[in-house]
Image (cartoon, grey):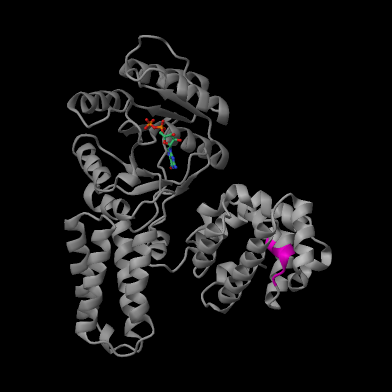
Amino acid sequence: MFESLSDRLSGVFDKLRGRGALTEDDVRTAMREVRVALLEADVALPVVREFVDKATERAVGSDVLRSVTPGQMVVKIVSDTLTEFLGADSSELLLDVTPPAVIMMVGLQGSGKTTTTAKIAKRLKEKERKKVMMASLDVNRPAAQEQLAILGTQIDVATLPIVAGQQPVDIARRALQSAKLQGFDVVMLDTAGRLHVDQALMDEMKAVAAASVPQEILLVVDALTGQDAVNVAKNFTEQVPLTGVVLTRMDGDARGGAALSMRAVTGSPIKFAGTGEKLDAIEPFHPQRVAQRILGMGDVVSLVERAAEAIDVEEADKLAKKMAKGQFDLNDLRMQLRQMQKMGGLGALAGMIPGLKKAQQAMAQSGANDKALVHLDAIIGSMTAKERERPAIINAKRKIRIAKGSGTTVQEVNRLLKMHQEMEGAMKKIRKMGGLGGLAKMFG
Ligand code: GDP
């Protein structure tokens, strides 16, 4: 996520980073580039202005220019300002009431509302051991209620039985009553969407909110729609008391602008980011981490958290010891590929590790998509133990044998070997980088 904005900004700051003395002009020039980068990333114009003014004022008005590393200081100021604009802290769901707590989901059709309802239900069930019931109030779109029921079966979360012909407010009341009687902790109301914001929709949202008194009203918007998402959010904010925003399709080619504008425009925190179609592809939104990611500093904390869930501690420990010695062979690559699959595939990892992005782009270019991961595993599986430990001995003849054994081609074997080299390079780079205490811990 945030590819282009982060690339642009890294460019601006790479110029500043290593430098000693900066003049006020240097700062202003850098800020002009920041401005262009933000505009290109589709950040709303008033937000860009406010951002650049604030960051410039801080950078120029403080002692930055006289500090030892003014470049770094400017980077930090921009990073802090980004964090502030994204919303200072991560925001949890506030469900501290006598159960059942009500979460009302609102948004336009196609924004990912129903999927997100199921994703959040799954999280609450698995991570917080809540007993959750979902109810669809969408009586306009044919099959909307069935869609939610199917998702409910998939994630093993109860859905309110469908009563044909019942209207949204009555469904909401029935859901609450039923949840109370059956001892549910949380009721999630998946309201109807529309193609565009219209008054009938807003009136319906208000009526449902009045009848169900939700603790959380979450607006679901599609990050890929950029400025449109911001406008939709603005419209909803004016009519319904939102408590938070969920940005979906952050796995897509979002330019980052929607996230940056959202908080400033709605005043509501972004609580979650949707990162894929699968029902566990959702993450709490951490402004500080996202700010760092935007600046191209990598998101080591998220990576470590995800790794902690997926990683095989013993294997990781072995790898850490080898890496400490500067070794990274094909056994390690194989283990990495398997971890990657467990950690949500290549896309989910992209951009999280500084310096690894390039290697990952190289991998993507060499055809290493998630399906190909399985192929790569097979290629390594067809090697001898010696070959895995010392890839350098793999000559043309061996390549032919390996390709045959794995049902692939020599080109594919070559690609794998090249990828290994790229990754070995990236690993070395990570080792050299400072501030990776988290990573160090992860590798024992
Ligand atoms: P609704 O009309 O707002 O209820 O939208 P749906 O929940 O039916 O989602 C529409 C489509 O978007 C479905 O195909 C979902 O799988 C997909 N979708 C939802 N969230 C995400 C996301 O975070 N990333 C991606 N790639 N797809 C998503």
Residue 191 vertical placement versus 307 (above, below):
above
Quadrant in the picture for the N terminus: bottom left
Who is closer to the viewer here, 7 or 82? 7
Who's the residue at 50% across and 70% down the image? 355
Q: Position of residue 290 (x, y in %)?
A: 40, 59
Who's the residue at 75% across and 67% down the image? 396
Q: Is residue 76 visible?
A: no
Q: Is residue 330 magenta?
A: yes
* Quadrant housing residue 94: top left
Who is closer to the viewer here, 363 or 3? 363
Q: Is residue 113 visible?
A: yes
Who's the residue at 30% across and 44% down the image? 225
Residue 408 vertical placement versus 217 (above, below):
below
* Quadrant housing residue 15: bottom left
Give the prevailing secondary structure in the magenta stretch: helix
Q: Position of residue 152 (x, y in %)?
A: 52, 26
Residue 361 vertical placement versus 109 (above, below):
below
User: Quick check: 255 left or right of 374?
Assistant: left
Extent of the magenta region: 328-333
Quadrant in the picture for the C terminus: bottom right
Q: Position of residue 99 (x, y in %)?
A: 45, 30
Residue 214 vertical placement versus 263 (above, below):
above
* Quadrant housing residue 382: bottom right
User: Quick check: 435 left or right of 195?
Assistant: right
Who is closer to the viewer here, 263 or 195? 195
Q: Is residue 174 magenta?
A: no
Who's the residue at 19% across and 74% down the image? 57
Quadrant containing ligand 1 reads top left
